């Protein structure tokens, strides 16, 4: 899609331009940040690197200077702008990489695992930048193995397994398909909870009792809790604590991968 390599077959359009017949226009529409990028010049400072790559993109000199300072401030790199790239930490290198992708202010961005192996603070700064781009009306194509990150940042999510697209949908629609809840009930030592009243209901998928904890998998948490309180004698006196959780995007990803193997 970025025209760095030719497709094995077929074609694609980016910002309305054919990647085979209009590669220059495609590249002008894109800002690309690769996770393991090694094309920066180690003996140049962060500022000098951005200046060099901005000049290659024919950004006017004064406009480029203003843009570089804006991006360095945005990514909290202003104080490091005159430090040689070779002395940057992994997080600083990744943030400078993103600065370079943003230089020409294109309408579309490709980010390849932008927060992989970074500390929490740096990861948050990068996620906030991506959210800012969304607010500005930019299109962002993000690849990540961090499902929480995908859930936080993405409007639509594509799950790919072994090079094959399994599903493309919104996070909410993905969760709706696997809409089950896990309800965990903590019991006093030796206490028993009679679950016959709810075990055979269609919205109850599984019940287990182990080590003083009763676990119920259900598709309707409201109806289940209502039945527990009304049908199970002494329920409110027996149960010490109730915890309710729904499947994470990571759980859903694993389910889709499991289904694709059948």
Image: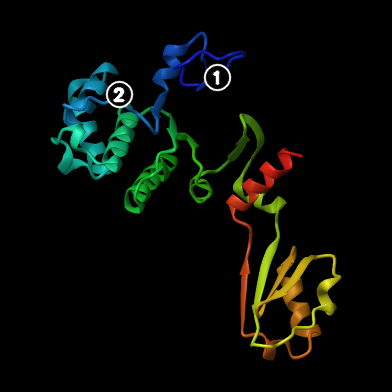
Q: CA distance from mark 2 to mark 1?
A: 26 Å
Q: Position of residue 213 (x, y in %)?
A: 66, 77
Residue in the picture at 70% in, 88% down = 191
For disc 2, the neighbor class at 10 Å (few under 14, some 14 to 19, many from 20) is few
- Please tell me whether residue 126 is drawn above or below residue 189 in the rendered image: above
| Numbered-mark total | 2
Q: In the rendered structure, which disc, 2 or 1, sits on the residue that comes first in sequence?
A: 1
Q: Pick the residue in front: 113 or 1.
A: 113
- Say whether residue 232 is left or right of residue 50: right
User: Callout 2: helix, strand or loop?
Assistant: loop
Expressed as whole percent of the image width and height from the top left, the position of residue 104 reads 32, 26
Q: Is residue 70 left or right of residue 183?
A: left
Location of residue 8 (image quadrant): top right
Category of crowding for the residue at label 1, using alpha-carbon neighbours closer than 10 angstroms: few (below 14), some (14–19), many (at least 20): some
Residue 209: % across, % down: 72, 75
Percent x, y for residue 35?
A: 39, 34
Q: Secondary structure at mark 1?
A: strand
Residue 39 - label = 2
Q: Is residue 77 above or below residue 101?
A: below
Taking depth in this image into account, of 100 and 69 the one nearest to the observer is 100
What residue sits 65% from the left and 32% below the top? 165
Q: Quadrant of residue 99?
A: top left
In the current view of this chain or complex, which residue is farthest to the top?
Answer: 21
Quadrant where the image shows the C terminus: top right
Q: Residue at x 15, y 43 (%)?
A: 79
Q: Which residue is mark 1?
A: 13
Q: Is residue 228 above or below residue 67?
A: below
Front: mark 2 or 1: 2
Mark carried by residue 29: none
């Amino acid at each position: 899609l970025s025209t760095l390599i030719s497709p094995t077959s077929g074609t694609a359009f980016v910002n309305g331009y054919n990647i085979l017949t209009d590669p220059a226009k495609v590249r002008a529409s894109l800002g690309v940040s690769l996770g393991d990028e090694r094309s920066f010049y180690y003996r140049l400072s962060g500022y000098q690197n951005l200046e060099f790559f901005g000049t290659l993109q024919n950004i006017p000199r004064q406009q480029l200077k203003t843009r570089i300072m804006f991006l360095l401030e945005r990514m909290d790199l202003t104080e490091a702008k005159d430090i040689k790239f070779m002395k940057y930490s992994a997080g600083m290198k990744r943030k400078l990489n993103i600065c370079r992708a943003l230089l020409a202010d294109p309408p579309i961005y490709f980010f390849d695992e932008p927060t992989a192996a970074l500390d929490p603070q740096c990861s948050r700064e990068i996620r906030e930048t991506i959210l800012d781009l969304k607010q500005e009306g930019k299109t962002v194509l993000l690849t990540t193995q961090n499902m929480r990150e995908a859930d936080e940042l993405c409007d639509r999510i594509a799950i790919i397994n072994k090079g094959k697209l399994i599903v493309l949908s919104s996070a909410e629609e993905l969760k709706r398909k696997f809409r089950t809840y896990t309800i965990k009930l903590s019991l006093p030592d030796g206490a028993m909870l009679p679950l016959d009243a709810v075990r055979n209901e269609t919205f109850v998928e599984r019940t287990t009792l182990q080590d003083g904890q009763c676990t119920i998998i259900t598709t309707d948490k409201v109806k289940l809790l209502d039945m527990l309180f009304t049908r199970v004698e002494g329920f409110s006196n027996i149960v010490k604590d109730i915890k309710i959780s729904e499947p994470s995007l990571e759980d859903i990803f694993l389910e889709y991968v499991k289904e694709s193997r059948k």
